[in-house]
Image (tube, rainbow, N blue to C red):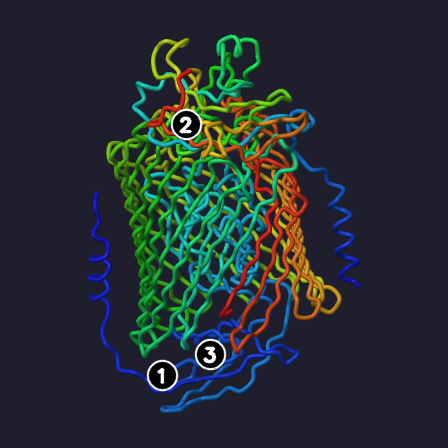
Amino acid sequence: MKYHSSSFILIFYMCLLFPISGFSQSISGHIVNEAGEALAGVSISVEGTVLGAATDLAGNFNIQRIPPGSFTLKIHMLGYGSKEQLIQVKAGEILDLGTIVLTETPVTGEAIVVTAAKYEQKIRDISSSMSLINQRELRLRNIVTLDQALAYVPGVNINGSQMNIRGSSGYSRGVGSRVLFLMDGIPILTGDTREINFDVIPTYLISRVEILKGAGSALYGSSALGGVVNIITHDIEQSPFYYARIYAGMYSEPSYNRWRWSEERLYNRGVSAFGGRKLGKLGFQLGGSYALDDGYRQNDRRERYSFSTKFSWFVSPYQELLISANYMNQDRQNFLYWKDLDHALQPPDDQLGDKVRSTRYYISSRYRHVLGRKNFLTVRLLWFWNRFRDNISGATGNKATSGNLSSEIQYSMQLGQTIFTTGIEGIFNSAESNIFGEHSGQNYAGYCQAEFSPTNRWKIIAGIRGDYFDVDSLDSDYRINPKAGLTYSVTSRTTFRSSFGLGFRAPSLAEIFTSTVASGFQVIPNTGLKPERNSSLEAGLNHQISKNFSLDGSYFYNYFNDLIEGEFLQSGEVQFQNITRAAVQGTELVLTGRFFAGFMTSGLSYTYVDARDLDSHNFLRFRPRHLFYWNNQFSPGDVLVFLDYRFVKKYDRIDEKFAVIIPDADERVDAHIVDIRIAYPLQISGIPLRFNFEISNLFQYYHVDLVGSLAPLRQYTFSMEAGL
Amino acid sequence: MKFLLYIGLISLFLLNCNEGMSPSEPDRGITGVSGTVYFTNWPPADSIFDLRLILFRDFPPTDIQSAILSGQAVVYPAITDTFQLPLFVDDFPYQIETPAATFEYFAVAHQFGTNFLADWRVIGHYDISPQDTLPTALTITQGTLLKNINIYANFDSILFSL
């Protein structure tokens, strides 16, 4: 199946848009903290319009083309209390709001998020657990691909490149993600394997990441069993803006001579830059990045470049069209598992020279029409194209080309104390490969949801979604997934939340049709695969202990049916099968606090996961039972020092049959990983700069992050950023 | 001061962790050589019957079969090993354990025909002074791993028939 995506998107929007005359009014202001220091990156939006801005380095903002009338200005920034200010704009007026003071708060309850309900909410008002990663954190961590940042999120564990939220996922080489990956609210999973490609969205484009935990299929459909990750990309700002970053790093040599495989020092380095501005009603943004990583293992080198662009058209204060695109090319060698424990950084000899070339691009667009307060129409389209070719299965190798077109029309409105949201979606997947064959699939869905606030203390949310899906040669199927949730503010400092929802995941084309031999594994198709399903329940309490401390605790329970996992057959072949019923339950505690008048900020999280096969009563494979993350920030003067510690309990169970193929497959230990970073900001000739030095895996702790795969060695990285 | 105190406490806690995984036996100093073999001009697969790295104690090597069977010459992979050097790669990093000795000749040997005893030739050897006519000798002492012993092997260049 072929899609003429670009033409389709253009024609679609030309039908929707119409010209509107301009407005000459503008508002401006200056935002500071309680100490009078300018705050950069504060988000300001004009409620009931698509207008907004972010403060620059000096804390100033300016919003143009605002129509005459009364509006509520919403001001928020992670780490500070949000603020609402009523403004009256007269025709031709240039309104200066003067200095606005935000109060610092270390807790995240005031943060504004969009993933839980598809419209803006305070995080404390949502009935499920959610974590956030902001842009500052991404930049300070020297993150190259997003999975590196997600590894620090409470309850999240990265198995290889596969994301596991609270025990929802094991390991299947990324195929069939149980976490839905969104970019600005629309799914971006590969068409063939339905996996997450973390490298498809360059990190410099990311403004923040929202991680919603628990089943989300009642709003998002297939794949949202374990949770939803929504990447919010950077807005195009009013004034010219730019950001550039260059980094270079080096891996430590292993302590053991037996593990040394190279005479050379092994480095990684890269550069990225982007910038843009608005010109009248139009805005644009351009960016690019290049990264080269020698890898710390033999046959693990990778080289990647990407280009991105984004255009905005502010048709009127109430209508906005965004179009963005990214192209990425990557050449990487393929390290799948070690030769044996004595050669932990080398692959088996017959896998030397294995390599993969990947090309991916997406074109995405979003049209938003604000019809009133909490009353808007959003249309989203995304075309994601992905191709890879490798030399892994003999002379011909594997190759696959896949496409994924996601489309959605969403309408939200507020009537009294109730916010209604409804929408329809269409998703089309195609694959053409010597592994999967040539196949296509479609998924059509409709959803509706209502959030009711009988009093200021209560919020009750209920929704339902119907999905119909069809894969070319197989029988079609459908699923109905309801959800319900509530939040109750016990006091101004304590909020109780509870939610229940159903989830499902339709099997990917790859899980149904894969037929290949790779790295010693022979995979055979299974055209009888059924969708996997789950029921998810959560109850949690958020309590702000004092101005500087907050505690969040939750209990979660997930019941899975027809769970799809890769199974070794008696014949030695691997096949994806609906294997079992399973229950995954546990608790999560998150404590955040600020000490010594802001000198130290600390975040501590502990997640306990008990993931059991209900038929055999064994642990599910590749699920760590304990996760403990401790992140600290110290601020001695202008310098920022970060110290992070992560503990990941070793898997209780792996696939025992891996041992037939992978030597020393059962070798694994608990993981203790410590990272330290130092950041120093300064200005040179008026250019804001920041110098960062990071040592990851400070104590050179050796552990596996998968079967037969030693996790990264100690790495020293120096980076410099400009235009913060 | 508080900062140093916290860093100190956290470091003490973390230093209590051991190093995690290790090789299956305590690591000892390896006696041997390591480096990379760079290959060019690979012939068709049907004319590559075997490929080995061989360290000879003499140059030119004499009584090759006896030297190999008696262990005087070190062969990598060992003759009894079913593993072969990877084919059609641009380079291959290697590490070979040897006895402490002087090896006058370190060569990449290619078996080009079906006769295991006769159809061998050298396609590359270790020589850091190509201006003279002798290859470079390697003296390996106990507990020492000689590194960066790189060899350039060209299948179009027959240096020696074994």
Q: Are marks 3 and 1 in contact (CB under 8 Å)?
A: no
Residue A116 locus on image (x, y percent): 47, 56
Is A637 rendered above or below residue B42?
A: below
Residue at point 31%, 28% (across, down):
A395
The numbered disc on residue A72 is 3
Q: Earlier in the sequence, mark 2 or mark 1?
A: 1
* SS at badge 1: loop
Q: Does residue A688 appear to the left or right of A670 in the view shown?
A: left
Q: Do callouts 2 and 1 point to residues on the same chain?
A: yes
Question: Does the image show residue A583?
Answer: no
Horizontal side of A332 relative to A250 (left or right) equals: left
On the image, numbered disc 2 is attached to which residue? Answer: A577
Across and down, in percent, residue B123 comes to 40, 25
Distance between mark 2 and mark 3 Cα atoms: 54 Å
Q: Foreground residue, A490 or A388?
A: A388
Name the front one of labels 2 and 3: 2
Q: Closer to the camera: disc 3 or disc 1?
A: 1
Place of residue A230 in the rendered image (x, y in percent of width and height, measured from the top left): 45, 55
Tell me which amino acid carries mark 2: Gln
The correct choice, above or below, for A512 with respect to A250 in the image is above
Residue A136 position within the rendered picture, expressed as x and y whole percent measured from the top left: 54, 63
Label 2, residues with CA under 10 Å away: few <14, some 14-19, many ≥20 = many
Q: Going from the N terminus, do you reach mark 2 or mark 3 first? A: 3
Check disc 1 and report the residue beneath it.
A67
Q: Is residue A627 left or right of residue A278?
A: right
Write down the chain letter for disc 1: A
The kind of residue tagged 1 is Pro
Q: Chain of mark 3?
A: A
**Camera-side residue of B158 and A525:** B158
Q: Which mark is residue B35?
A: none
Among the 4 quarters of the image, the one containing residue A272: bottom left
